[in-house]
Amino acid sequence: MTMIANIALRAGTSSRLSTTIVTAAFGSKRSSWNYAQSGSSRRFISQSTAKAMRFVQYRSATTGEKQRLGVLSEDGTQVSDISDRYEGDLITFIRSGVSLDEVKAAASKATPLKVDSVELLSPVTNPQKILCVGLNYSGHCEEQNKPIPKEPMFFSKYATTIVGPHDNVIAHRISDQIDWEVELAVIIGKKAKSVTKANAMDYVFGYTVAQDISARDWQKLRNGGQFLIGKSMDTFCPLGPAAVHKSLVKDPHQLAIKCSVNGVEKQNGSTSELIFRIDDIIERVTQSITLLPGDVILTGTPAGVGMHRKPAEFLKPGDVIDSEIEGLGKIKNKVVADS
């Protein structure tokens, strides 16, 4: 993967749009959910303030393949390296328990890099667990003619599914039913066992945008009806662009959430539709499973997935998926052929 400035060119946009991509990913100083025009297609751009508690993992020309950890400037155009004490890794940083004031102090002493000069990675890599919740939006239940579930349906994805906010998604040759699902991802901030709903949000570090890419044939028809392979193929979990600290998100259950494919809107919902909210999910899971710092929870997807369209629609090489959540940013992933 090349730097962000070149991603726009690979996707067939002009160099003028590289700034638009950065703005869409991190927001501007205005606080609203606006439309912007890009050629003949309409793009959705989050204009929320990008304050200093947006964490990114990245590589740059000076670091080569070495992963670094940084925080974004207030306008979202620069990143300040805070890697030295935390091994360039968000999970190591979370485990350290360092105060946000200390982070701000460290960032203020760093020489900032321009965001468009670095390669953004997933904001969290190698979590011990990626936990997912199925059928967790009312609209997603309705489009399948299924009743609202009385308890959540959990499944998992492997960490090898994780790729960055602008990385490619592989159209694995063993499937011809690859589908999109934009999701709000929760990043756990501390060890959680037997947590009650009343204090469950204390265990959240922050949030990011996720795509729960799914091979529907393997999810529904093959592998004995078990979800694992259909959900866990390599590259099936793009995350990013940043881990947004929970202090910047007033209410994670009141966020607009959108997905488009090749510039055509496919999903447009709100996290207010969540059937089982984040605190409820954490309480239920931690009665039997311990959540650890850096673990990721994908909270479900709104209506509009390809499988339930008439006729059904599936991703193919060359398609571009835009996934966006209000205040968290936007990720853009191209579908490529299996090689």
Image (tube, helix red, strand yellow):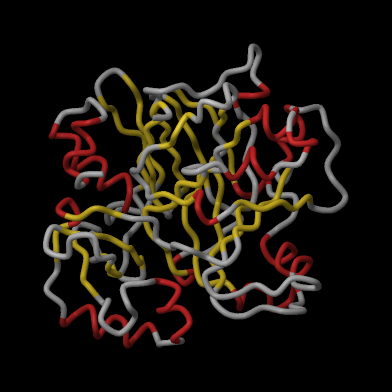
Residue at left offset 45%, top offset 40%: 323
Indicate the position of residue 304 as horizontal and vertical percent values. Answer: 61, 28
Side of 227 relative to 88 (left or right) = right
On screen, residue 221 above or below 169: above
User: In the picture, residue 57 is in which quadrant?
Assistant: bottom left
Residue at left offset 53%, top offset 27%: 266
Residue at left offset 27%, top offset 56%: 29
In the rendered image, the residue lying farthest to the top is: 311
On screen, residue 26 above or below 278: above
Side of 213 relative to 41 (left or right) = right
Please name whichever residue, 91 or 184, is drawn nearer the observer in this view of the structure. 91
In the rendered image, the residue lying farthest to the front is: 339
Please name whichever residue, 50 or 25, is drawn nearer the observer in this view of the structure. 25
**Quarter that holds the C terminus:** top left
Please name whichever residue, 307 or 173, is drawn nearer the observer in this view of the structure. 173
User: In the picture, residue 308 is in which quadrant?
Assistant: top right
Indicate the position of residue 155 as horizontal and vertical percent values. Answer: 71, 51
Indicate the position of residue 175 as horizontal and vertical percent values. Answer: 58, 26
Residue at left offset 35%, top offset 67%: 55
Side of 314 relative to 328 (left or right) = right
Please name whichever residue, 11 or 220, is drawn nearer the observer in this view of the structure. 220
On screen, residue 163 above or below 333: below
Indicate the position of residue 109 as horizontal and vertical percent values. Answer: 16, 82
